[in-house]
Amino acid sequence: MNGHLYGIGVGPGDPELLTMKAARILGCVDLILAASSTKNEGSLALDIARPHLSPGAEIISLGFPMTRSGDALRAAWEENARLVLAELEKGRDAAFLTLGDPMLYSTFAYLLRTLRGLAPDQSVTVVPGITSFQAAAAATETVLAEGSENLLVLPGIREASGLRRSVEGADNAVILKSYTNFAAIREELRTFPPETHCVFASKVGMKDQLIARSLDQAPEDPAYLSLLLLTRKR
């Protein structure tokens, strides 16, 4: 019989923010699958999860290209899905590591969809993880939503003007991956109503965490793991 595949959300950066379920599974599986860029084999998710891994677990790095080319991405998803399936067919249980939560802007979601096309009956368990914006809200005591308010989650890779149109229709918003287009996003946000409260957070839960409670205090060139919280002043 095939082994079992687990999609594990390792949280935003602090190893202590893994759920008890995630930590238990990581200590039991035979194989750890760590996504990385094809330009290097480093995996932040693996670094976060490492304290919880079984000493005998094998680690396999799965390369994914940092590109928006649909053809290149689909080829990588299929290649890696076939590699994962081959390991599962050996009867090995495997855990695929992903930052934050596996079902939110995660490589695992694409891999899972591709795997389901190849092996619809493959047994899979998705273990949710704490997101970076939840951790940032906790670190800054920022209420993301209350009462009848809504919360909008957006990727920073969208055009700044498009972000504005989306945010204007929301009570509160989170902009993930804000490093991508930060200069334009910041200029757009400067024109927002004064009652909008903005928090910038980078590398939440890590040793070099950076929190700025205004756009003026945010760095000009943010790190990869950066986000913005936009909420009503209370």
Image (spheres, rainbow, N blue to C red):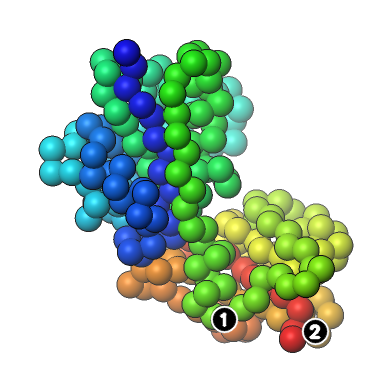
Q: Measured from the top left, where is residue 92 in percent x and y?
A: 26, 23
- Please state, as top left, top right, bottom left or bottom right, where the C terminus lies in the image: bottom right
Q: Nearer the viewer, residue 96 or 63?
A: 96
Q: Measured from the top left, where is residue 210 in percent x and y?
A: 46, 76
**Compared to 138, does 91 lie above or below?**
above
Q: Amino acid at mark 1?
A: Glu
Residue 32, by quadrant, is: top left
Q: Measured from the top left, where is residue 222 in percent x and y?
A: 51, 67
Residue on which disc 2 sits = 195
**Compared to 95, does 48 lie above or below?**
below
Q: Nearer the viewer, residue 135 or 204?
A: 135
- Please state, as top left, top right, bottom left or bottom right, where the N terminus lies in the image: top left
Which disc number belongs to residue 70? none
Residue shown at 49% from the left, 48% from the top: 128
- Image depth: mark 1 or mark 2 in front: 1
> On the rendered structure, is 42 left or right of 172?
left
Q: Measured from the top left, where is residue 141 in percent x and y?
A: 57, 81
The answer, for residue 161, to whether it is visible in the render is no
Residue on which disc 1 sits = 141
Q: Nearer the viewer, residue 158 or 19?
A: 19
> On the rendered structure, is 143 left or right of 86?
right
Residue shown at 65% from the left, 53% from the top: 155
